[in-house]
């Protein structure tokens, strides 16, 4: 049974191309050439997806991008009905919100359309981008590692889309609702009209931030496979991880209210506990050959 140090060394040797497999026979220039074609294909798919979104930009903006800033967004009605179903009255009903956006530059609408198209292209093409990355590192993996990594693209994509959906349908409405209804002083000295690019940047940060953060179980699985972490390690440092999660939740949420931060922190806590379960299963599988030889 290989130790954690041996598994790490084996992994990094394969990444450097020093193992005796296909990657070891490739020169540094060959690696760069292979990487260039993977990046080219990924960029091409991303560009095509972005162009399609740009062509349909009016529909995308009205039905998707601007939707969380409207009173009739699906989340507001759902949470209110959920509160009535749970017999807690209007506790989950958020105040009405109707954000009006303004532009202060001539190129604002066009640049915002480009930003929506590019970020949307990354989100939609995410499974293919991960697949191209997988094709690049696949030759460095042993048959056993290929077996363990089966279905990885599906799980990576699923975690990302779950995080993006969480950010869009839950965190974004809470964030915009809080910011739109926040007042300074008893007499309002300003009219709240956020700029178009500020709104889009905030929404993009929420969606991408949640999507990447929800990859925690996948990252834990990879680190466990190469021997960098174990279930006992995660349990030992759980209290420190919770502090980091609270800090991360404060970074992800643009609004300073504790409600939005708790909404982000709770799923992250659950993801951390799920990661412990996943890493424990990896540890058990790695210990099985040891028990057979003992």
Image: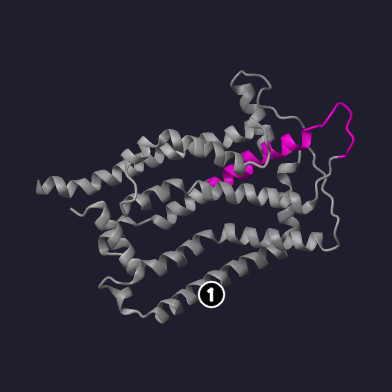
**Residue neighbourhood size for the residue with mark 1, other residues' Cα within 10 Å, grouped as few (<14), some (14–19), many (≥20):** few
> In the image, what residue occupies the spot 55% across and 49% down?
211
Q: Is residue 137 magenta?
A: no
Q: Is residue 46 above or below residue 290?
A: below
Q: Position of residue 195 (x, y in %)?
A: 80, 50
Name the one closer to the observer, 153 or 223: 223
Name the one closer to the observer, 281 or 5: 5
Q: Is residue 193 above or below residue 15?
A: above
Name the one closer to the observer, 71 or 260: 260
Q: Position of residue 15 (x, y in %)?
A: 36, 67
Quickly name the residue at label 1: 40
Asked which secondary structure carries label 1, the reply is helix
Q: Is residue 176 magenta?
A: yes
Q: Position of residue 137 (x, y in %)?
A: 39, 67
| Count of numbered tags | 1
* Numbered range of the magenta stretch: 163-191
Q: Name the quadrant containing residue 22.
A: bottom left
Question: Where's the C terminus, which quadrant?
Answer: top left
> In the image, what residue occupies the spot 56% across and 69% down?
45
Q: Is residue 26 above or below residue 186?
A: below
**Relative to 11, is 247 on the left or the right?**
right
Q: Position of residue 172 (x, y in %)?
A: 66, 42
Magenta stretch, main secondary structure, is helix
Display coloring:
one colour
**Relative to 86, is 254 on the left or the right?**
right
> In the image, what residue occupies the spot 34% across and 47% down?
229
**Can see residue 3?**
yes
> In the image, what residue occupies the spot 81% across and 32% down?
183
**Can see residue 270?**
no
């Amino acid at each position: 049974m290989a130790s954690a140090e041996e598994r790490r060394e084996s992994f990094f040797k394969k990444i450097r191309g020093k193992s005796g497999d296909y990657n070891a026979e490739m020169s540094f220039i060959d690696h760069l050439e292979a990487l260039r074609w993977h990046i080219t294909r990924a960029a091409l798919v991303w560009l095509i997806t972005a162009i399609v979104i740009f062509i349909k930009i009016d529909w995308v903006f009205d039905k998707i991008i601007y939707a969380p800033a409207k009173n009739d967004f699906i989340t507001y009605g759902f949470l209110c009905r959920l509160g009535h179903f749970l017999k807690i009255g209007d506790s989950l009903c958020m105040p009405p919100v109707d954000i009006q956006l303004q532009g202060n530059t001539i190129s604002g609408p066009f640049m915002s359309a480009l930003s929506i198209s590019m970020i949307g292209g990354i989100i939609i093409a995410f499974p293919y981008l991960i697949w191209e990355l997988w094709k690049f590192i696949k030759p460095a993996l042993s048959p056993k590692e290929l077996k363990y990594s089966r279905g990885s693209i599906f799980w990576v994509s699923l975690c990302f889309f779950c995080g993006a959906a969480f950010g869009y349908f839950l965190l974004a409405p809470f964030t915009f609702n809080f910011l739109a209804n926040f007042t300074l002083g008893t007499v309002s000295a300003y009219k709240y009209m956020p700029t178009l690019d500020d709104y889009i940047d905030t929404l993009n940060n929420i969606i991408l931030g949640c999507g990447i953060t929800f990859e925690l179980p996948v990252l834990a699985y990879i680190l466990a496979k190469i021997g960098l972490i174990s279930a006992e390690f995660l349990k030992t440092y759980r209290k420190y991880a919770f502090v980091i999660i609270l800090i991360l939740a404060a970074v992800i949420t643009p609004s300073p209210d504790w409600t939005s931060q708790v909404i982000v922190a709770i799923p992250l806590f659950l993801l951390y506990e799920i990661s412990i379960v996943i890493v424990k299963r990896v540890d058990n599988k790695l210990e099985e050959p040891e028990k057979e030889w003992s």
